[in-house]
Image: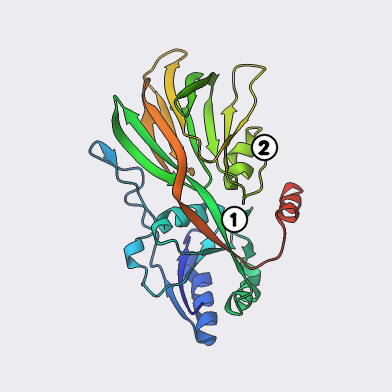
Amino acid sequence: MDHFYIITNYQKDPNGSMALAIRKYLGEQGKTCYIQEGLNESCRNVQKGAEEICGRYTDVDKIPSDVEGVLVIGGDGTLLRAARDVVDRQLPLLGINMGTLGYLAEIECTSFSAALDRLLADEYQVEPRMMIYGEAHRHGRKIFRDVALNDIVITRNGRLRIVDFNVFVDGEFLKSYSADGVIISTPTGSTGYNLSAGGPIVAPQASMMLLTAIAPHTLSSRPIVLPADAEITIEIGSSHGTDIDGAEATFDGDTSVKLNSGDRITIRQAEQKTMLIRTKTTSFLEILREKMNK
């Protein structure tokens, strides 16, 4: 690779000092490196008319056409946002971790030069990761759509109370949950909220979807593993009290849409994939063992 683009989280990289250091280092190696000027949060969670125009943190149109790889400085959350921002360009991403826990951002900021040396020497792999796509409908009309690399989470909105969720798979009724919410996770997201809610850990290269209820009001609820080509529909039932607050669907903890009783959100495998650059030979089990012991 000869041309790079840096997306940095300025809350974790004040004044872009890490981004500037990386650009300088790449420049000394004769490479071209562009830096995104800032994270654009002006469109976050802003609904325009009947359909959500998803807020983005990166203007993908401003990424030069000669860019071959994107370096993402921050943590897993920053990388998740960047992945969704550039998904239509299918640019590979390398995460440089300045956060507290990095499953996706594998390179620590203190050792970025060694990782870049491996990248420039073509000692790396590009690992495709499954993404999911969700569409929310109200009275048969689409009100929201977006993609997610980790998960789509449907939870109660507002006050503490149980909400009923009806789950359908490929058009066939599966189960009703009375719970705080439901998580639809990819293998990549299995070590995120899904794990905290008692869901299974899955190797990130796998292709499947995980369905995990959040604090279900039952003793018999178990997570469900479904094939990647399944179509999952979650119908919002009534809340146990009042429907004033409704529910909410959140994509990778970022963009979201409020849902009312009777609304449906349909989730399926996305056509796009996130392409992650791996410069380490560390196995998934080694990473898991290290992170789980922290």
* Mark 2 or mark 1, whichever is nearer to me: 2
Snapshot quadrant of residue 211: top right
Q: Residue at x 24, y 36 (%)?
A: 50
> Whole-percent x and y of residue 233?
45, 29
* Residue at the image position 66 percent from the left and 32 percent from the top: 198
| Residue 168, above or below 83 | above
**Can you identify the residue that label 1 sits on?**
104
Residue 113 vs 151, above or below: the answer is below
Tag count in the figure?
Answer: 2
Q: In the rendered image, which quarter is residue 97 located in?
A: bottom right
Q: How is the image coloured?
A: rainbow
Q: Is residue 253 left or right of residue 283?
A: left
Local secondary structure at mark 2: loop
Q: Residues within 10 Å of mark 2 (few under 14, many from 20)?
A: some
Q: Does label 2 or label 1 sit earlier along the sequence?
A: 1
Q: Which mark is residue 200?
A: 2
Residue 277 location (% of width, % of height): 57, 64
Q: Is residue 122 above or below residue 48?
A: below
Q: Nearer the viewer, residue 56 or 188?
A: 188
Residue 74 rendering spot, x and y as whole percentages = 54, 60
Q: Amino acid at mark 1?
A: Leu
Cα separation, mark 2 vs mark 1, equals 18 Å
Q: Choose between 52 and 205: the one closer to the eye.
A: 205
Which amino acid does the dot numbered 2 rest on?
Pro
* Residue extending farthest left: 49
Residue at the spot x=62%, y=78% of the render? 117
- Say which element carries label 1: loop
